[in-house]
Image: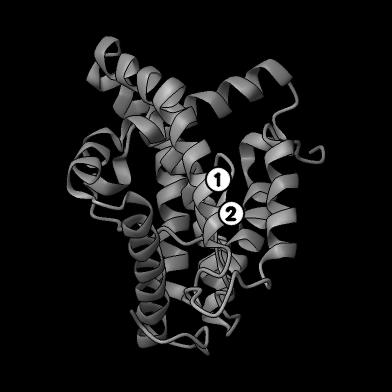
Amino acid sequence: MTTPRFVFRPALAATAALVLLAGCATGPDANPKDPLEPLNRGVYRFNDAVDRAVLKPVATAYVDVTPSPVRTGVNNFFGNLGDLWSAVNAGLQLRPRETADNLLRFSVNTVLGFGGLLDIASEAGIQRTRIDFGQTLGRWGVPSGAYLVLPFFGPSTVRDTGGLVADSAADPVGHVDHVPSRNSLYALRVVDTRAGLLRAGQIFDDAALDPYGLMRDFYLGRRQRQIDDMIDKGIGLGDGDDAE
């Protein structure tokens, strides 16, 4: 396989710059988990503008014109690819059950589910556990660091941004040699992901007086609970943060 290439290289470069700035507080009243809040809010506004102008309309059209079985197949396909990397991360975390389940899911759905278009494993009761490298780092004691909003990628932390680099390098789509096919797969995955968030996004927009603050608190709390749950279930050191 060739070295993976990324669609959003400018975004990753901007991400690296944000990580270098992450240690800089904005003042004595800065949120200790969000010392870069003014910068993060600017990136949030940029992402929101891109979403409203491009991603949300495209995702809405995708839902309107694409039959539900086709959308389900697309979602299953990308979920199946994620199961393989989840199995690797579960192995790195010394979680044999989740490692075996995700490997079995990937094998069953790839062979019997026409490359993952059908989710035979779920119908057979084989549980999916989504695990990324940021969670693996947190399980073994890497602190989350400052909250970051990444261009295009959205909410993150210093630790999760490092994990995102590993996740991207391990992404099977990045190893597709044919450039148009690879970029089409990237685009389809973005649209599929955004389509799955349409209803939740509308509820979020209607309920939030401060969407930025709500998103930040939800993301940090959810990630901390994921780490805590891993520690409760087995081996691990924790990430040094208090539970939300």
- Residue 93 shows in this picture: no
Q: Are marks 2 and 1 in contact (CB under 8 Å)?
A: yes
Q: Secondary structure at mark 1?
A: helix
- What residue is disc 2 on? 39
Question: Where does the C terminus fall, quadrant-wise?
Answer: bottom left
Q: Nearer the viewer, residue 132 or 57?
A: 57
Judged left or right of residue 124, residue 243 is right
Whether residue 98 is situated above or below residue 233 in the rendered picture: above
Residue farthest right in this picture: 2
Q: Residue 21's quadrant in the figure? A: bottom right
Could you say which disc has been placed on residue 63 in the image?
none
Judged left or right of residue 6, residue 187 is left
Residue type for callout 2: Leu
Judged left or right of residue 121, residue 18 is right
Residue 182 percent location from the top left of the image: 65, 25
Question: Where does the N terminus fall, quadrant-wise?
Answer: top right
Whether residue 168 is situated above or below residue 182 in the rendered picture: below
Residue 66 percent location from the top left of the image: 30, 13
- What residue is disc 1 on? 43
x 36%, y 83%: residue: 243
Q: Nearer the viewer, residue 198 or 102?
A: 198
Q: Secondary structure at mark 2?
A: helix
Q: Residue 227's quadrant in the figure? A: bottom left
Residue type for callout 1: Val
x 49%, y 29%: residue: 50
